[in-house]
Amino acid sequence: MDEAVEQLIPAVEEQLTSPATPYVRETLDRLLTEPDIEEDEAKAMIAFCLADEIESLGAEKRDFSEDRYKTLLALLPIMPEGR
């Protein structure tokens, strides 16, 4: 697992319980209905999307885009191409 993604797992776990980010829990629950995806892998996929958004905001010098993050999550289990 990519180190940046691994470091974001705690942030994902916080988002899973936060009332501000119910879409993260919905994404995890949806991924867990896939036959070949375990919880750790699903969390890593979500962290990958978070890492992609963080990398993008740094490169584009903009604020965090919750809409873009939600879009990336909606595409899972297909992974973003940017990384």
Image (tube, rainbow, N blue to C red):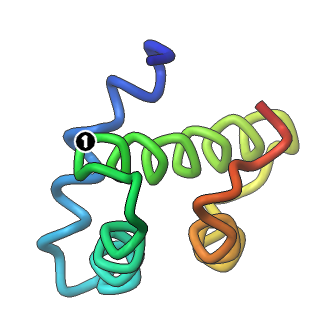
Q: Position of residue 36 (x, y in %)?
A: 40, 53
Rendered view: 76 above or below 25? above
Q: Residue at x 73, y 46 (%)?
A: 57
Would you say 56 lies left or right of 30 here? right
Q: Residue at x 71, y 70 (%)?
A: 68
Rendered view: 57 above or below 30? above
Rendered view: 22 above or below 32? below
Q: Position of residue 52 (x, y in %)?
A: 66, 42
Q: Residue at x 38, y 63 (%)?
A: 35
Residue at the outermost front position: 35
Amino acid at dot 1: Asp
Would you say 10 lies left or right of 50 here? left
Would you say 55 lies left or right of 5 here? right
Of the pair 59 and 28, the residue shown nearer to us: 28
Identify the residue under disc 1.
40
SS type, badge 1: helix
